[in-house]
Amino acid sequence: MIRDDLADALRAALARVGVDAPDDIHLEQPARRDHGDWSSNVALVTARKAGRNPRELATEIAKILTDEPPQHVASVEVAGPGFVNFRLHDSWLHDVLTAVVEEGEAGYARHDDGAGVKVNVEFVSTNPTGPVHAGGGRWAAYGDSLCRLLERDGFAPHREFYLNDRGVQMQLFAQSLLARKQGQPVPDEGYQGEYVSEWAAEMPDDADPLEWGYERVKKDVADTLGRLGVHYDTWFSERSMVASGAIEATLQDLRDHGVVYDADGAVWLRTTDFGDDKDRVLVKSDGEPTYVLPDIAYHRDKFNRGFQQLIDVWGADHHGYMQRLKIGVQALGHDPDELEIILGQFVTLMRGGEEVKLSKRSGTVVTLSEVIDEVGPDAARLTFLLQSIDTKQVFDIDKVRSQAMENPVFYVQMAHARIAGIGRTATEQGVERLPLADVDLSLLTHERELEILRSVAELPDLVRNACAERAPHKVTTWVRDLAGRFHGFYHDCYVIGTDVPPELTQARLWLVEAARVGLAIGLDLLGVSAPDSM
RNA sequence: GCCCUCGUAGCUCAGGGGAUAGAGCACCGGCCUCCGGAGCCGGGUGCGUAGGUUCGAAUCCUACCGGGGGCACCA
């Protein structure tokens, strides 16, 4: 990898001038092309400590590297306050091409940073009292793509859905189902949604409304998320912890850690020891646990199952609760950093130019399933992953559905379809792609061609960063950029045509393959299909 | 009152210590003898305000202003 070569060269040069190198030599591809292909700030970073002037230091380094240039390096320059800029021969990009097509979809931009660490990612979890609403799609797309990134970065992610299947809401849901079944109005606090009537009609007369309804919800949720390409490894039931005694055991565990006391007929967790404003109740004076205790028990269970890192994806409305759960985990003796809670901002749904008010009580809920019906799974997923999870999102159904340019999913998929089209044309015209070793990649000198390779060269770092920052939307940004570059290439550079020399066709066929691999990896990370035709 | 999060182009958003801040949409004007025009090219007085840290701040810190969300023996 070119960057490692450049870093080694810089390290050697620093040693020659007697300056201690930093542990991590920073190299980046500057935004501006005239700043070179790669740039390093080592001189700026080390100058102060070494008591040197950054520009002078950079100049000495550049001199050394100019006299004995590393492979692919055409020139080394000093610029600005003391950057060391490398200008490379195009051959470094041709090497990128070779690496991409040799490693392929499975191997390129795959790392072992995670070293197989088991990471439990919990997302979308709800009360099993109805379908997933439209906003839930954001957590589904985010959580699943995060898992795909973790997997590609070498971790062993585990997708988990927590079912709050114990408590009042389940009772109300069951009562609502039964009432509809009997043609009665649902209870005041019950569920008014249309789906309750529909499901009640399906329910056999002898069914237990609670158990039957529970299964019906689980099926609906799994089907809907499955349509988005989201499949869980574990559906974890809160009730199962009552049956197994895990909740009692957790309480005892907390007592053993000395963070629990009894007062006013209730059982309290001494959260003030960990910075909370007031202590929190674990078991109410009526003997029922609050939601805190089962949640602590649940996370204790995850650790007991061997996960070294836990990630929870929650809506921003759970913010106030985050600290309590982290304290609970800490009180059990875990490092609080082992539990990572990601708060996602909400989605506003627009339809017909107006905001769709989501009200569970009145039953005006737009389900995720309906959204998928309207825009399709690919458009839904890509749209949910268009923006950072930290910003609230406006999901305009009409715009996402329109197969127009304001919909990036078509733009990106079109690039992949065009690549497949080139393959079809090659087949029709009897053009066969020769083995890579027999092809002269040095013919790839057009700016459009090099732009594609520069983009593909960034993918390994991009995967690493997007994973570490828990930011799948960075993959979306990258894929859109690569697609744009490909469209530009496609327009200006024919792969197969009357004016194109056969040797250039060969080189471009491999370039197209490299672009295909990049797009396929990116789209896979997003969980969006890569169609051969549209 | 306290906590979290966001404020970047007309609109939707990237960029989250580096050198002249980007993309899409919208708007205006150009491009089709050949791989899909669902495309390509050209057009831009924008980082909420005020301080601070730094060789360097859209990025980090503090305060303030504005949007969203939270602060239960509810889940």
Image: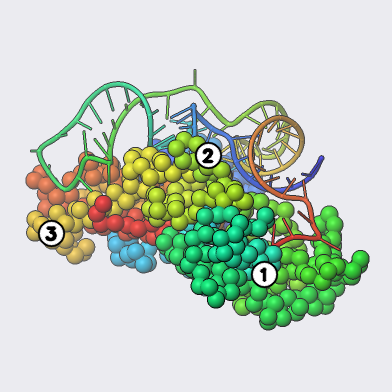
- Outermost residue to the front: A183
Q: Which residue type carries mark 1?
A: Arg
Vertically, is A4 above or below A335? above
Foreground: disc 3 or disc 1: 1
Residue beneath disc 3: A427
Name the residue type under label 3: Thr
Q: CA distance from mark 3 to mark 2?
A: 49 Å
Figure check: A68 above or below A286? above
Instruction: Specify the farthest residue to the bottom.
Output: A244
- Asked whether the beta carbons under mark 3 and mark 2 sit within 8 Å of each other, the answer is no
Q: Position of residue A503 (x, y in %)?
A: 14, 53
| Residue A19, visible in the rendered structure | no
Between A361 and A504, which is closer to the camera in this rendering? Answer: A361
Q: Residue at x 84, y 61 (%)?
A: A279
* Residue A1 found in image quarter: bottom left
Q: CA distance from mark 1 to mark 2?
A: 33 Å
Foreground: A397 or A189? A189
Please indicate, yes or no, whether residue A392 appears anywhere in the rendered image. yes
Q: Which residue is mark 1?
A: A166
CA separation in Å, label 3 and label 1: 60 Å
Query: Residue A355: which numbered mark, if any?
Result: 2
Q: Earlier in the sequence, mark 3 or mark 1?
A: 1
Query: Answer yes or no: do the residues labelled 1 and 2 have beta carbons within 8 Å?
Result: no
Report which quarter residue A425 is drawn in.
bottom left
Instruction: Give me the chain letter of mark 3.
Output: A
Q: Residue furthest right?
A: A264
Q: Is residue B41 left or right of residue A401?
A: left
**Horizontal and vertical percent for residue A414?**
29, 49
For numbered disc 2, what is the local secondary structure? strand
Figure quadrant of residue A340: bottom right
Rendered position, A287 above or below A359: below
Q: Amino acid at mark 2?
A: Glu
